[in-house]
Image: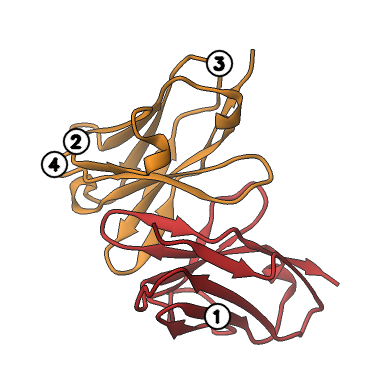
Chain colours: A red, B orange
């Protein structure tokens, strides 16, 4: 089974900061990677798919990159609404695997 | 707007079973696969399995093989997830999520809290 490892587990940042979260796959997954944002008590929300495609309605300050085994989610200028937990996810036709999550906290 | 509406919170005793429903509206259920994901309190997201509502075929995470059953009722546009032999570690919020092929989980249910306690 493919394992997804995110780093860091927690990130402290200030409004306006550039933030980068890394996700590594245990083997090559091409670009079959998505990123989700989750706020407390809410379902996750899709941000990025196919590693770098921005989901409709998601602010352009969010971007994704990478292929193969290493991927990044970047928030170019952190906004108050962005303090949340972020998950990477590998998906294919019949399964999915999530990273353990990265909590972005207020510094 | 697509909607996935799940059944309400459940409290179960260890060893019992729970069946959670997820009713789809404003799209054709059989056109998209549906996944189930759970989240224990304070923990991350855990994938449980997938159902193809068109033919009812399923694929389950190895961890849940033998304990989970996913079904669908196309007449009511509803998918179901039943988990048996419940233990305290199964206490979690259970989500259904629609998958858009090649994209990811584009719509999620609101979640159903299942509490397992004696």
Q: Which is closer to the viewer, label 4 or label 2?
A: 4
Q: Tell me, yes or no, whether dots 3 and 1 are on the same chain.
A: no
Pointer 4 with pointer 3, Cβ within 8 A? no
Q: Residues within 10 Å of mark 4 (few under 14, many from 20)?
A: few
Spatial CA span between label 3 and label 2: 31 Å
Pointer 3 with pointer 2, Cβ within 8 A? no
Dot 3 corresponds to which residue?
B14
Q: Which is closer to the viewer, label 3 or label 2?
A: 3
Q: Residues within 10 Å of mark 3 (few under 14, many from 20)?
A: some
Compare residues A83 and B18 and report the one nearer the observer.
Answer: B18
The relative height of residue B72 versus residue A106 in the rendered view (above or below) is: above
Spatial CA span between label 4 and label 3: 32 Å
Spatial CA span between label 2 and label 1: 39 Å
Secondary structure of the residue carrying tag 4 is loop
Q: Tell me, yes or no, whether dots 3 and 2 are on the same chain.
A: yes
Secondary structure of the residue carrying tag 2 is loop
Dot 2 corresponds to which residue?
B74
Q: Which is closer to the viewer, label 2 or label 1?
A: 1
**Residue found 55% across the figure and 73% down from its top:** A23
User: Does the image show residue B1?
Assistant: no
Image disc number at residue A72? 1
**Residue found 47% across the figure and 61% down from its top:** A3
The relative height of residue B20 versus residue B24 in the rendered view (above or below) is: above
Pointer 2 with pointer 1, Cβ within 8 A? no
User: Does the image show residue A91?
Assistant: yes
Residue B71 appears at what percent x and percent y? 26, 32
Quadrant of the rendered image containing residue B85: top left
Instruction: Name the chain letter of the residue that bears numbered label 2.
Output: B
B85 left or right, relative to B56? right
């Amino acid at each position: 089974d493919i394992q997804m490892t995110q780093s860091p587990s927690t990130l402290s940042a200030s409004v306006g900061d550039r933030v980068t979260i890394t996700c590594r796959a245990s083997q090559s997954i091409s670009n079959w990677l998505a990123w989700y944002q989750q706020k407390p008590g809410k379902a996750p929300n899709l941000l990025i798919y196919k590693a770098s495609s921005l989901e409709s309605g998601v602010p352009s300050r969010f971007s994704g990159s990478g292929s193969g085994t290493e991927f990044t989610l970047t928030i170019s200028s952190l906004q108050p609404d962005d303090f949340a937990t972020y998950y990477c996810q590998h998906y294919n036709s019949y399964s999915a695997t999530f990273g353990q999550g990265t909590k972005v906290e207020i510094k | 707007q697509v909607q996935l509406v799940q059944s309400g919170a459940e409290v179960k005793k260890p060893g019992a079973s729970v069946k959670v429903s997820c009713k789809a509206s404003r799209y054709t259920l059989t056109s998209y696969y549906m996944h189930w994901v759970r989240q224990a309190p304070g923990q991350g997201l855990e994938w449980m399995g997938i159902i193809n509502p068109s033919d009812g075929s399923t694929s389950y995470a190895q961890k849940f093989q033998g304990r989970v059953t996913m079904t669908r009722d196309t007449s009511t546009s509803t998918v179901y997830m039943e988990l048996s032999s419940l233990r305290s570690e199964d206490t979690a919020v259970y989500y259904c999520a629609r998958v858009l092929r090649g994209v990811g989980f584009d719509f999620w249910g609101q979640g159903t809290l299942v509490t397992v306690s004696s």
